[in-house]
């Protein structure tokens, strides 16, 4: 058994990691941390874990180096890089769920986030999108788990980007459930602020836009516009991408390309022609569902859904861990989507 530590176990991604890892046949959770709830049992913080995990939370701000084989950093950006500096020893695997190591270029990170205090670690980090970077992930000791919106947008675009089939503008219109904002108290996440409404937010300023752009730019010169929206539901992301093909293609041919590109991917499901994904059908699972349609004028519309807390965060983190450990990528992630 490998020993896993969850740093920041009392947030939503930490909780989901615990729930998933309890069913992982090769992992034992040996460390869970929180500053706010240190000394309390995790099952007293989350009743969902009653009788399933009775471990006690220890302070995040204490020495944890050398205790685990794998550390999941479920902290806000800024705090994660400080923790990574302490834990990084080239032996343990560190999987950071924050944005701290997602940018290869420090200047871009600092423009959109904050000063980077662990610049020496950046060359060690691999962007943890398995469908694109599996070979690099295999040897990594520091993995930057992608953002939730970027995961959905990049998986929606990747086959067309890889084959250089797009030109011009790409519009990415994403909608997320409220858990995407984390468990911390925020006015904008409160029930009355969210329920029975639907709004765009951070238009032109959301930090996931530069993350999507820098990944798209690696494959194509396209103009990317990203607009996130908040949906009055707990979890799930639906991303609709509008792009222009260099040459018209039939929907069936693009679907064939997607099926071919993702044929060995355990967590990508391509819908048949005329069928489009629904957040309800990937909830609580690590699946990314994709459907698409092309139009006579060369426009292609691609729709992707994920569970933001699983494929968009903790599930993808486990998938990355499995890849580094050289075990079946699906381990601990075989949970079937729950509907209704
Ligand atoms: N939510 C999502 O869908 C999602 C998806 C992808 C990536 N992410 C990223 O994953 C990370 C965790 O997200 P989350 O949604 O789980 O957040 P969250 O629910 O707000 O939880 C944050 C956790 O970090 C701890 N924490 C907060 N401030 C801290 C500080 N200054 N020093 C040390 N610990 C601190 C909290 O622990 P205490 O008990 O000590 O307060 C809590 O356990 C974030 O970087 C987020 O951007 C989130």
Image (tube, rainbow, N blue to C red):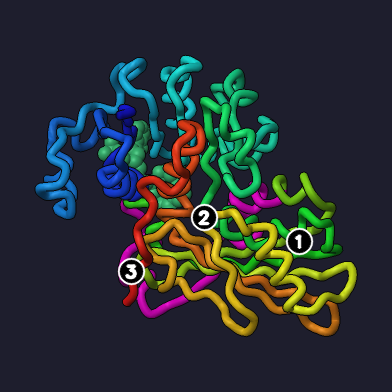
Task: State which mark lies toward you, 2 or 1.
Answer: 2
Q: Which residues are magenta?
A: 185-213
Q: Looking at the picture, does residue 53 appear above or below residue 241?
A: above
Residue at the extreme right of the image, as rendered: 247
Is 34 colored magenta in this rendering?
no
* Residue that badge 2 annotates: 266
Badge 2 vs badge 3, beta-carbon distance below 8 Å: no
Task: Specify which label sits upstream in the sequence, 2 or 1.
Answer: 1
Look at the numbered disc 2 and give the secondary structure of its residue.
Answer: loop
Could you classify mark 3 by the number of other residues whose Cα lies within 10 Å: few (under 14), some (14-19), or many (20 or more)? few
In the rendered picture of this protein, how many numbered marks are placed on residues? 3
Tag of residue 338: 3
Q: Secondary structure at mark 3?
A: loop
In percent of the image, x 50 and y 37: which residue is there? Answer: 323
- Give percent across and percent down for residue 32: 26, 33
Q: CA distance from mark 2 to mark 3?
A: 18 Å
Q: Tell which of 312 and 205 is nearer to you.
A: 312
Of callouts 2 and 3, which one flags the residue occurring earlier in the amino acid sequence?
2
Q: Secondary structure at mark 1?
A: helix
Residue 225 placement (x, y as % from top left): 71, 62
In depth, the one of 123 and 76 nearer the eye is 123
Q: Is 307 on the left-hand or right-hand side of 213? A: left
> Could you tell me if residue 198 is visible in this image?
yes
Residue under pointer 1 = 160
- Disc on res. 74: none
Image quarter of residue 224? bottom right
């Amino acid at each position: 058994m490998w020993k896993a530590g969850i740093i920041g176990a009392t947030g939503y991604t930490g909780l989901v990691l615990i729930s998933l890892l309890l069913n992982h046949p090769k992992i034992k959770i040996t460390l869970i941390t929180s500053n706010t709830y240190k000394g309390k049992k995790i099952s007293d913080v989350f009743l969902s874990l009653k009788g399933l995990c009775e471990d006690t939370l220890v302070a995040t701000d204490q020495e944890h180096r050398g205790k685990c084989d794998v550390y999941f950093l479920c902290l806000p950006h800024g705090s994660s890089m400080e923790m990574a500096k302490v834990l990084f020893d080239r032996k343990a695997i560190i999987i950071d769920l924050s944005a701290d190591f997602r940018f290869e270029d420090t200047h871009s990170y600092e423009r959109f986030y904050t000063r980077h205090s662990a610049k020496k670690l950046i060359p060690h980090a691999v962007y943890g999108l398995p469908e694109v970077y599996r070979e690099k992930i295999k040897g990594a000791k520091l993995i930057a788990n992608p953002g939730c919106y970027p995961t959905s947008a990049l998986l929606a675009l990747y086959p067309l980007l890889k084959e250089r089939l797009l030109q011009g503008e790409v519009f990415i219109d994403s909608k997320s459930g409220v858990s995407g904002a984390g468990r911390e108290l925020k006015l904008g996440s409160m029930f009355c602020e969210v329920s029975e409404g639907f709004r765009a937010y951070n238009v032109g300023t959301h930090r996931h836009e530069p993350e999507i752009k820098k990944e798209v730019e690696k494959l194509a010169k396209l103009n990317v516009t990203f607009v996130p929206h908040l949906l009055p539901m707990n979890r799930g992301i639906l991303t609709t991408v509008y792009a222009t093909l260099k040459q018209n293609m039939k929907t069936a041919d693009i679907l064939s390309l997607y099926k071919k590109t993702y044929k060995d991917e355990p967590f990508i499901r391509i819908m048949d022609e005329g069928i489009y994904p629904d957040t309800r059908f990937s909830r609580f699972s690590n699946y990314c569902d994709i459907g698409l349609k092309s139009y006579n004028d060369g426009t292609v519309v691609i729709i992707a859904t994920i569970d933001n807390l699983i494929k968009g965060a903790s599930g993808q983190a486990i998938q990355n861990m499995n890849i580094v450990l050289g075990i079946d990528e699906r381990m601990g992630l075989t949970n079937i989507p729950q509907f209704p």
